Image (spheres, grey):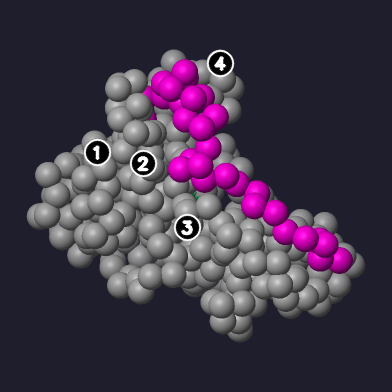
Amino acid sequence: MIAAFRARSRRSLNVNVFCHQPATGDVSLQSAWLELLRAHFERHGAKPPAELKEIYRSFVADDAMLEALLVEKPRVVSFHFGVPSAERIKALREANIVLLASATNLVEALAAQKAGVHAVVAQGYEAGGHRGVFDADAVDDCLGTLALTRVLVRELAVPVIAAGGIMDGAGIAAALRLGAAAAQLGTAFIACPESAADVGYRKALLSDAAHHTVMTRAISGRPARCLRNRFTDLGAAVSRGQIPAYPIAYDAGKALNAAAKAAGEPGYGAQWAGQGAPLARALPAADLVRRLADELREHE
Ligand SMILES: Cc1cc2nc3c(=O)[nH]c(=O)nc-3n(C[C@H](O)[C@H](O)[C@H](O)COP(=O)(O)O)c2cc1C
């Protein structure tokens, strides 16, 4: 992916790596989860997979990934779900790579700062996609972007980047006024033609469904904000102890989505979206960035 990017652009590249604690497989829990999903597979003419795998390796346990980053030297490397060891951070810093980490509360933000990142992303509860919590089983205070950004701006020495629910220039201006050095937007770009979102996801995002997002762990095994759909409804009816760990549950989630989609049902997708989803615009990414810059100037 880095090579494909570089073949098309000489501009800065941010590579994002997941730093979750590697999953410990629990075979009986996984079998029970697949049994629970069986009816959903069968409704779409499919069967659940016989077993589940750890489909993504964590950066904290992947030396080849570190080697690749040290060779390729992207301008920025960002961490989600935690921060890697001091040795890994030191190696990346010595390669002159700018390091960012997501944090959802002050304790995580201080840990990221202490580990040596150059800036912290304050990810509020509004944010679309996976919540960057370091420990998915810890109590979550569900801090919103506004309060979290203010707390981190006051307590951290490194710059804070606000993320969660920011969809336009007015939102970016508000984040900067809170003391953030920058704003990070995710949901705002899903409807861009360049994104990998499929037709069902785009249709849902641009419909009234955008007004309803849910935090669910049923799709991947970690909490993530998603458009309310058949999978989030399924998740609302199970307890968290029934769901295998990330990313093992995601293996089942992806298989169920593929089976349902093949049968014409788009409602089992990982349709990640933040609470700002109704403000999404289907513009080419470059046009959207120009629009955001114009709107920001209007609000400065
Ligand atoms: C479709 C989608 C995919 C995402 N994937 C990632 C990811 O791979 N890594 C990551 O660190 N954050 C990911 N995020 C979270 C974003 O980094 C960011 O925290 C979030 O999009 C900000 O909130 P917003 O969606 O309301 O703009 C994703 C968000 C969305 C909406």
Query: Quick one: quadrant of the N terminus?
Result: top right
Label 4 close to label 2 by CB (< 8 Å): no
- State the image coordinates of residue 38 (x, y, percent, origin top left): 80, 74
- Closer to the chain start, of discs 3 and 1, is 1
Does the residue tagged 2 have its C-beta within 8 Å of any atom of ligand 1? Answer: no
Magenta residue check for 50: yes
Seen in the image, is 146 located left or right of residue 12? left
Mark 3, secondary structure of its residue: strand
Which amino acid, mark 3? His
Residue 17 is left or right of residue 299, and the answer is right
Marks 3 and 2: CB-CB under 8 Å? no
Q: Which residues are magenta?
A: 47-76
Q: Which residue is mark 2?
A: 85
For marks 1 and 2 on the same chain, the one whose residue lies earlier in the sequence = 2
- Mark 3 vs mark 2, CA separation in Å: 22 Å
Badge nearest the viewer, 1 or 2 = 2
What's the residue type where badge 2 is placed? Ser
Instruction: Mark 4 or mark 2: name the one nearer the start of the chain.
Output: 4
Q: Position of residue 231 (x, y in %)?
A: 64, 70
In the shown orientation, is residue 61 left or right of residue 237?
Answer: left
> Residue at position x 21%, y 52% from top?
110
Circle nearer the N terminus (4, 1): 4
In the picture of the structure, the residue carrying the numbered disc 4 is: 7
| Residue that badge 1 annotates | 116
Q: What residue do we see at 81% from left, 65% from top?
A: 48
Residue at image mark 3: 130
